[in-house]
Amino acid sequence: MSFGQALKRKAREALLPLGFAALCGYFAWHSIHGEFGTLAREQRQKDVAAAREVLARAMEERDRIERRVNGLRGPEIDRDQLDERARTLLNLVGKDELVIPYEPGRRLY
């Protein structure tokens, strides 16, 4: 048997295991770096945590606004809040009150 024939025979014998190794390597790489891999999963978890923080802040703000609105509605109206809102909308002040003007772009709330 010549050297060339022996080399071809060894290459043919190694072809199947090398193919399987390449296939395993392909799937292993994609299990880490792919679209649904571990790195992408960690990034999605960070995104979900950030979205939950934004949701919590939005819910706090909504609850705060709901409390203010509930003070202006219903059979028991919060007189202080009603007075504050009326003064803001109608631009009214009392005779004995001190007025501090704000810049046009700045609002009190």
Image (tube, rainbow, N blue to C red):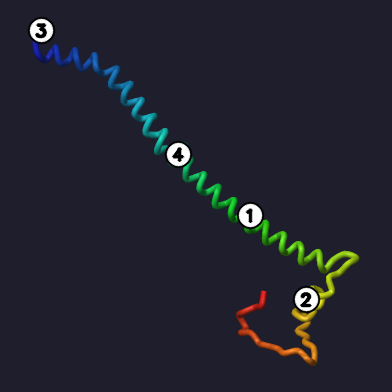
Which numbered disc, 3 or 4, marks the residue closer to the eye?
4
Give the camera-side residue of 82 and 23: 82
Considering only order in the chain, which callout, 4 or 3, is on the residue closer to the N terminus? 3
Closer to the camera, 13 or 48? 48
52 lies left or right of 78: left
The disc placed on residue 1 is 3
- The x and y percentages for residue 89 are 76, 79
Name the mark nearer the viewer: 4 or 2.
Answer: 2
Which amino acid, mark 4? Glu
Instruction: Say left or right for 47 vs 63.
Output: left
Q: How dense is the environment of label 4, judged by Cα within 10 Å: few (below 14), some, or many (20 and up)?
A: few
Local packing at callout 1 (Cα closer than 10 Å; few below 14, some 14-19, many 20+) is few
Q: Quadrant of the C terminus?
A: bottom right
> Residue at left 61%, top 80%?
105
For residue 85, the mark is 2
Element marked by disc 4 = loop
The residue indicated by pointer 4 is 35
Give the mark nearest the N terminus, 4 or 2: 4
Q: Position of residue 74 (x, y in %)?
A: 88, 64
- Please report whichever mark, 1 or 4, sits nearer to the chain's N-terminal start: 4
Residue occupying the point 62% across, 83% down: 104
Mark 1 to mark 2 CA distance (whole Å)? 27 Å
Q: Amino acid at mark 1?
A: Ala
The first of marks 2 and 3 along the sequence is 3
Distance of label 4 from label 2 (alpha carbons): 52 Å
